[in-house]
Image (cartoon, rainbow, N blue to C red):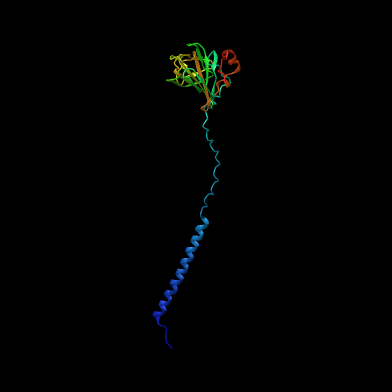
Amino acid sequence: MEKNNPKNEKTTRILYLAVVGVLIFSALIIGLVAALGKDETKLPTEQPPTEQTPTPTPTPDDGKEPDKETETTPDTYLAPATGAVSKRHDDSLPVYSATMGDFRVHEGIDIATEAGADVFATARGTVSLVWSDPLMGECLSIDHGNGVVSIYKNLATDLAEGIQKGATVTAGQKIATVGDGALIESAEEAHLHFEMTFEGKQVDPLTYISEDSAKVSLSGDVAYES
């Protein structure tokens, strides 16, 4: 029967002790971790976010005056001069022109009066243009808003004080005097040639001038015969 080798027994004993030591060390580590886990201070719970009142967004008009409404077209239009209607508006039926010796359409009305007679703004508005026409003499136009424009032709060279492009005028304000520079109508008596347009199209001024104003200022109608 063989005897155990003392060297083998010693090696076996060392291995055994090593295994036991590893187990004991592992147990100590586990126990230490568990102990530390129990004593760990808990973190405070997260607080709910504080509700904030939204800041109101200012409107564009804050602290400002509201825009003024666009001025409407005048309700009443006055006769631009005192006299007799010597020629009516007709853009379809030609009428005889004493100056040109032919028949042609006539846009606007002619108000027969004296040279130098006052010419008035038919309604409030803004002088939109002042010009010299080789056939109709001195001319100016007034924008009354909403597409309505009045046009005054055959005026004297010198306009009323302050009347120029961009000037604001009131109804009945003197803007000029009747002239004699309309070459295309030079054979006719002194008169104001008066036109009106709506959205760029010619209209009959007599449909705009109030009845009361026409009765007072345009008496003695001597309109052409159709």
In depth, the one of 116 and 187 nearer the eye is: 187
Single out the residue that lies furthest toward the bottom.
1
Asked if residue 153 can be seen in this view, the reply is yes
x and y percentages locating residue 177 in the rendered image: 48, 13
In depth, the one of 123 and 3 nearer the eye is: 123
| 138 with respect to 61 (left or right) | left
In depth, the one of 184 and 204 nearer the eye is: 184
x and y percentages locating residue 211 in the rendered image: 60, 17
In depth, the one of 175 and 138 nearer the eye is: 138
Name the residue rendered at 60%, 14% in the picture.
Answer: 215
x and y percentages locating residue 134 in the rendered image: 42, 20
Single out the residue that lies furthest toward the front.
101
Name the residue rendered at 49%, 66% in the picture.
Answer: 27
| 122 with respect to 161 (left or right) | right
Single out the residue that lies furthest toward the left.
7
Q: Quadrant of the N terminus?
A: bottom left
Label count reads 0
x and y percentages locating residue 30 in the rendered image: 49, 63
Name the residue rendered at 50%, 62% in the picture.
Answer: 31
Q: Quadrant of the C terminus?
A: top right
Asked if residue 144 can be seen in this view, the reply is no
Name the residue rendered at 47%, 68% in the picture.
Answer: 24
